[in-house]
Every structure is written in C-alpha cells, then in structure tokens.
Amino acid sequence: MKTLTVTLICKDEEENLRRLLPTLTFADEIVVVDTGSTDGSVQIAKIYTDKVYFFAWRDDFSAARNYAIEKSCSDYVMWLDADDCVPVKTINSVLNWKNDSAENADFYYLKYRMGYNSDFWFWRERIIKRCKKCRFKGFIHEAVVPFGFTKRFDGEVIHTSSQNHASRNLNLYRKAIENKKKFSPRDKYYYARTLIENGMHNEALPVLRKFCYCKNAFSVDKAEAYKLIAKYYLSKLNVNIALKYLSKSVSVLLPDAETRCLLGDCFYVNNDCASAAEWYEFALTSKVQRGFVNDYFKAFYPLVQLSVCYFRMGETDKAKTFHLAAKSISPDNPAVLSNDKWFVT
C-alpha cells in the first residue's frame, strides 16, 4: 500500500482546522506548518497530529509549503489549505488509489473547485511523489513544476472560503517589486491577474502584453493572457481589437468554451446573430479543459445567448428550445425570467 502525507500551512485557521482535520482519515501522516497564529490553530492541530511546526513567515508561500514537504515521510505528498474540503467521493478515490499497486504515477492533478456549487474550477497538482522535484516555486500563486508521469485523478478538492485575497496579494507583489525581486513569466502573469482582480485594468494590460512575449511562458497562461486582454476590449465594445487578441489566443491553444462564447459575443455585439449562434453552439460542444474552467460557458450562457440570437433571427421555435434548456439548468436566473415573457403560450 502506498503511504500519503497531507501537508498544510496555516495562520489563524482555528475553525477551518477544526472542520478539516477530522476528515483526513485517509492520510498516513498529517504535517501542519503554522506561520504565526494568534488563535487556537496550533492547539487544534496537535489534537490530530504530533507533526506541528512553526515557520517564520517571509512573504513566500513556496518556502512555507516546501518546509512542510521536508517534514513529511510518506511515499506521496498531498497539499491542502485549511479552508479546503475533501469530499467523501474523493476520499474513497484516494483510498482505492493507495491500495492499487498498478497506480504509480509521479504527479496527479485533481479538480480544484472554488466553492461547493461553483462552476469555476481548474486542474491543480495535488498528489505528488515525494522526492527532490516535489518542491513549490513562486512566492505567491505557488506551484510544483510537473515531472515524470502525470495523470488526472478522479476526484476534486473544494475551496470553501469566500474571503477575497486580491488586496493581500497585490500588497505582496508590490513589496516584491519594491525589493527588486525578479519575476518569472508565471509571476508576471499572475501579477497581471491580481491587478485585474483589484480593478486596475489599465495597469494590467501592459503587463499582460509583455508577458505574452516571454519565451518560457506556459502555453496555457499565454492563451489565457490573450483572452484577458480580449475581454477588456470587448467590455469597451472595441470588437476589432477583441477579435485580434482572441485570434492570438486560439493560435496558441484550441479554444475553450469561454473563448468560443467570447467570439460569439463579438459577433453578437456587431448584430451578426447568425455568426454569433455558430460560436455559441460550438461552445456547447467544447471538451477543452485548460487553465481556469468556468462551466457556465459550457451550457447555461451559450443556451441563453442562442435563445436570444434565434429569436432575433425570427426562428422562435428554435429559440424556445434553447430557452427551455437554459431554464432547466437555472430556472430562477434573471436572464431566464426576463426571457420567459417572450415564450408564453
């Protein structure tokens, strides 16, 4: 049987630890690294593990996570945040995996869902063979560089916190800039995203453009960066520039559902409902899962837009079909309620 250590770093997470730690029954070992709690986090952690350590915070998430990894002793490491949740289905998948001698990948991705009922998720490295390569990089938005045989795992971790860290993250980036810290391409990309999250689009755009010229940038980040630029210009109804950057995104990687919807939006804004409908229908068939995934663009949003497009083209029966499909997903959505009046029989 494979052994597994769960590692997590925390600061003032007493309530979250009280909820999370009792559920980690699948772990052979739990390592908790505290970075300066003033509540009862340490005392709660010690109820569930004797491997509780202190790490002096130095504005570097990777440093803290790597310290936790260094304290682990199992075959594999699974990292979590204190405000994460591991569903029962995932726990059972992990237990089955531990007992399966044929399952020996080096690097496993699990879905990381942003909330219990959220459509927003992304693949995140989560269970990793413990070795020298199993180390995080990046002082913020840290990640382990993939190595060896990688595989997607049947399970997900749910991030339960509704707390917005945009301001905190921006302060960390600004402090790093003041200290003349050299940014990797990935750092530049996430710095731009943080600027956007703080409503600073004008500052984000030049950072994104420069990032797109980085030779060592990950393709998925580059495709997403072009998409972010396109979304900004589309919000300003500058369709031609939006289309230019969406084309650049598609030239890097196949378009995901959101990119297809954005292309549909460009034609919709230009009152070309026929072309818009083609892209929205294309979104419904999307199986591309890259970067940040929002299932909203795989079903509900394109269905609503198709209903509107076909209604405007005079194809009311077809419009009603798409409207009812959208209504079956979210009957109380404002867009559905607004469109209902056009399909009263």
Image (spheres, rainbow, N blue to C red):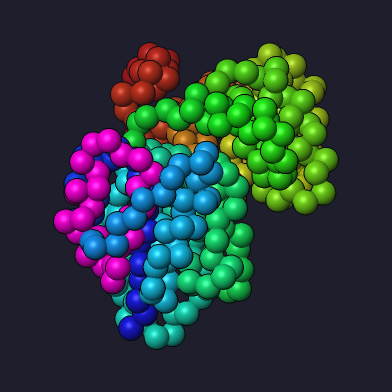
Between 207 and 92, which is closer to the camera in this rendering?
207
- What residue do we see at 55% from left, 26% from top? 171
Q: Residue at x 47, y 36 (%)?
A: 296
Q: Is residue 121 magenta?
A: no
**Relative horizontal placement of residue 50, taking residue 164 as reference (left or right):** left
Can I make out residue 247 in this image? no
Left or right of 127 in this view: 38? left
Magenta-highlighted residues: 24-48
Instruction: Give percent across and percent down for residue 245.
Output: 77, 32
Above or below residue 87? Residue 99 is below
Q: Nearer the viewer, residue 235 or 45?
A: 45
Q: Quadrant of residue 117?
A: top left
Question: Image height check: is 117 above or below 197?
Answer: below
Quarter of the image for residue 1 reads bottom left
Along the line of sight, the residue nearer the viewer: 322 or 194: 194
Let me know if residue 74 appears in the view.
Answer: yes
* Residue pictured at 53% horizontal, 50% vertical: 62
Q: Is residue 174 above or below residue 286?
A: above
Tell me where residue 137 appears, x and y as whole percent: 59, 53
Residue 169, how many percent across, how many down? 52, 31
Q: Residue at x 35, y 47 (%)?
A: 34
Residue 101 falls left or right of residue 303? left
Residue 108 in percent (x, y) is at 49, 66
Location of the C terminus by quadrant is top left
